[in-house]
Amino acid sequence: MADIITKTNSEIGFSNLPDDTILNYESTFGAHHYSRQQLVVRKAEGIWLYSQDGKKYLDCLAAYSAANHGHHHPKIVKALVEALQGSYGSVISNVVYTDSLGKFLEKLATLTPQLGTRFGDNGNKVLPKCGGVESVETAIKMARYYGYKEKGIPDGKQEIIVFNNNFHGRMITVISFSTSDKYKEGFGPLTPGFVSVEYGNLDAVEKAVNKNTCGILMEPMQGEGGMFIPPDGFLKGLRDISDKHDLLLLFDEIQVGLGRTGKMFCFEHENVIPDGIVLGKALSGGLVPLSCFVTNSKLMDSAFQPGRDGSTYGGYPLACVAGNVALDVLVDEKLVENSRKVGSYLADKIREIAKRSDFVKEVRNRGLFIGIEVKDGDAMKYCRELLDLGLMANDSHGHTIRISPPLILTESEADFIADKLELVLVK
Ligand SMILES: Cc1ncc(COP(=O)(O)O)c(C=O)c1O
């Protein structure tokens, strides 16, 4: 069973509502759109999740990379509390300026390498939203508008190339190009204008290009699709195809960006510069929703003028206060380097375990984004055992155990993960 911590429940701040009542509330009053594990989290701190009975669990999912900084990072919490107590956290009508938005935009636009270099060295611009899927839609609007305005594609005929097993979120346009029937069955009419091809297959991409193609949208490493790394040269090949056919190359870095794979941006593994990126999840340090589409200033200015986009809470002060500090923490506390270093330490250990295991098919990793594909295709079976041992992990695409803890993980905490995996994978 999980380690018992020494603090009392009241010291830790648990509510007194019993777990059963919480489960009952959810099943009675909540949509059943997630299959949940049998754990009610009362408190989260750093890499640890705490239950009411005082047990602690190492968080190996980190809310799909949203908690990259560790839960309740003290510097981000402090900034948020100060904003609320200082009366500059509340949502402000988007018809006036705020200090926090300006500062955040400058920080993110300049932290990101110049995107869309073929459009000139104009700097980047940022369009903020709340959920990741909203910013994916902004990227789609950008590619379609570019096709219409710059390439002369008739409006309504624009096409974007996407990839099999993609995951970009859950709203109608985005599920329309999912290759998972479960995500879209019965939710039609779906949005047209997408062609899906095999991830990693450049010939398939080249064949899919036609006179109406305006862009390519892809995850530089697939997250929900099974944690797959594209073959060497794939991103570079996509860049070449995009340049040859004048397409916008758009990377969804929502799950794999901001240090998760051991680089600030996952596209840096191949030194390929896209025309636009989508960020979310860890952008605010896991405390308030914040997502962004970032692109070359020239492209952003061409597509988005007043009235062409907007979002009530997109870029509101509290989110930007969090975003500002979260970006500083990533850099100042060297979380990207830590992800690379501890990620390779842990992945090496897991590869050793895999050699002794009858159950592991393959281990794939970049930084602290580690997938363990199991032979029987039932990753959750192992995750349930891990939960009993004090480690909370989940599957990716059914067949892969996802090990993606907060990027503050130390080597001794990595040892804890490896020890638990050993118990479950070597029998
Ligand atoms: C690659 C990718 N894109 C988009 C999304 C959607 O983000 P959100 O759930 O914030 O809408 C996710 C969420 O897991 C994701 O992993």
Image (cartoon, rainbow, N blue to C red):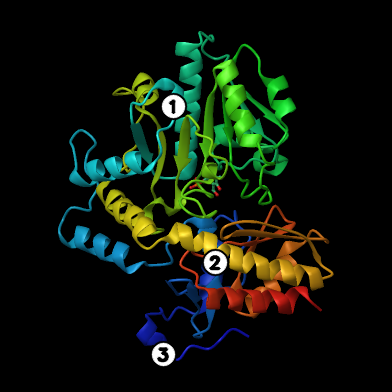
Q: Compare marks 2 and 3 and give the one earlier in the sequence.
A: 3
Identify which residue is drawn at 27% across, 40% down. 106
Residue 8 is tagged as 3
Q: Nearer the viewer, mark 1 or mark 3?
A: 1
Q: Residue 368, image x and y in percent?
A: 56, 60
In the rendered view, would you say 10 is above or below 129?
below
Q: Which of the pair 195/367 is nearer the observer?
A: 367
Q: Nearer the viewer, residue 268 or 368?
A: 268
The reply, left or right, for residue 155 in relation to residue 163 is left
Residue 182: quarter of image:
top right
Quarter of the figure with residue 286:
bottom left
Q: Looking at the image, which residue is at 42% across and 67% down?
A: 71
Q: Determine crowd level at label 3: few under 14, some 14-19, many 20+ residues with C-alpha closer than 10 A.
A: few
The CA span between labels 1 and 3 is 56 Å
Name the N-terminal-most of marks 2 and 1: 1
Amino acid type, label 3: Thr
In the rendering, which numbered label is found on residue 342? 2
Residue 117 shows which numbered tag? 1
Q: CA distance from mark 2 to mark 1?
A: 33 Å
Task: Tell me the number on the disc at residue 162.
Answer: none
How packed is label 1: few (under 14 Cα within 10 Å), some, or many (20 or more)? some
Report the side of 146 relative to 345 (left or right): left
- Name the quarter where the C terminus is drawn: bottom right
Instruction: Assess whether mark 3 and mark 2 are in contact (beta carbons under 8 angstroms).
Output: no
Quadrant of the frame with the N terminus: bottom right
Residue 335 locus on image (x, y percent): 43, 61
In the displayed structure, 370 sits above or below 212; it is: below
